[in-house]
Image (spheres, rainbow, N blue to C red):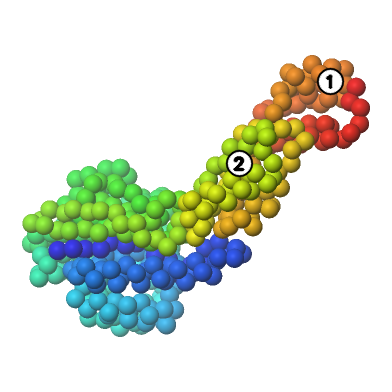
Amino acid sequence: MKFFHIADVHLGAMPDKGFPWSCDRGREIWESFQNVIRQAGRENAGLFLIAGDLFHRQPLLKELKEVNALFASIPDTKIVLIAGNHDYIKENSFYKKITWSKNVFWLSKEELSYVDFPDLGVRVYGFSYHSREILEPRYNRIQISSSMPVNILLAHGGDESHIPISGDTFFRTQFDYVALGHIHKPQVLLRNKAIYPGSLEPLDKNETGAHGYIKGEIRKKEIYTEFVPSSIREYKRISVDVKDDDTQFSLENAIREVIKEQGEEHLYTVLLKGKKPVHTEIYTEAFYKLGNIRDVEDKTTMTYSKEQLNEKYKGSIMEAYLALFEKEEATEETEKAFQYGIEALLESGEELL
């Protein structure tokens, strides 16, 4: 029997507000969700697990109806879901007003509950969030007694404010599979046993790498899983090594080539490294026109040494400036300030001696 496991879809999110692609990203999250539902139907999955945060915030009734229609489109697949910390069940939540399709099983209680599927030989446990935070490590103390061959836990958490999970929380678990949610990067805690699929689509520039879902198969009580990349876009970091002979034009061409090679649809942070010649200025603002550039980080330094400057400009304003910074604690901020001062002195056009 095949099963699909997703989490942290965050329907309703609008990543990168203020950037040209933000509205597209909101629509793409819905599209990505539709795609995985259709794929589960095409593969005749028996079970579809959603481990919390289907929505980015409290869902609207029309959004729930849209989701329910998608669920109803794969009537032979049993869908089990819980609410996470983003879409937790409030007193007036529309979650309480929706009538789910017959193939949808909503573990809405604050206490652990379960649903049995005798035809599949599976029991699925879980509980939903009814507040933004749960500080207790509630998964540490779960004990079950089940007559079903396979027992699965739907779980959402993993940091100190949302059901803390330690390295050994599920090491001796009674569950055959723990379908986790909350952590947005795919992560395997125990092979074929306890897995975060990550968010379907990346939601933040720090969520680099592939995103998708877990596809599993239950064969004679043994569980086998694989991660399936499926996101429409990725956040990527690209490094550009700046050399002595680089110009603004050559750097822009280098960035264009990398983006063309890695995919123009993706979202990029550009990291500039290396050493640039004195008097060379890089106009980083111009890079944002080269593609879907989310951020530019200039980590370059100028090609000179303090010793060389001391020797060349002995007895000058430059020597006094260098001596001033020798007393400062070396931090990223002071180093940047030092560089700006050196550039200003060298570019002033005035006699330093």
Residue 7's tag is none
Is residue 216 among the parts visible in the rendering? yes
Residue 176 location (% of width, % of height): 17, 54
Q: Which residue is mark 1?
A: 313
Locate residue 199, reporting x and y percent.
Answer: 39, 59
Looking at marks 1 and 2 on the same chain, the residue that comes earlier in the sequence is marked by 2
Image x and y of residue 284, in percent: 68, 48
| Element type where label 1 sits in the image | loop
- Element under disc 2: strand
The location of residue 227, given as percent across then percent down, is: 29, 54
Along the horizontal axis of the image, is 328 left or right of 145? right
On screen, residue 8 versus residue 193, left or right, reads right
Quarter of the figure that contains the N terminus: bottom left
Where, by quadrant of the figure, is residue 50 drawn? bottom left
Q: Which residue shows up at 49% across the image and 66% down it?
A: 25
| Left or right: 239 in relation to 33 | right
The amino acid type found where label 2 is placed reads Leu
Figure quadrant of residue 36: bottom left
Task: Identify which residue is drawn at 64% across, 57% down.
Answer: 289
Q: Vertical placement of 319 versus 155: above or below?
A: above
**Three-letter residue code for mark 1:** Tyr
* Front residue of 184 and 232: 232
**For the residues marked 1 and 2, what is the alpha-carbon distance in whole angstroms?**
29 Å
Q: Nearer the viewer, residue 121 or 233?
A: 233
Position of the C terminus by quadrant:
top right
Q: Which mark is residue 272?
A: 2
238 is higher (above) or lower (below) than 301:
below
**Closest to the observer: 178 or 313?**
313
Q: Nearer the viewer, residue 1 or 13?
A: 1
Q: Residues within 10 Å of mark 2 (few under 14, many from 20)?
A: many
- Residue sitting at 82 percent across and 31 percent down? 346
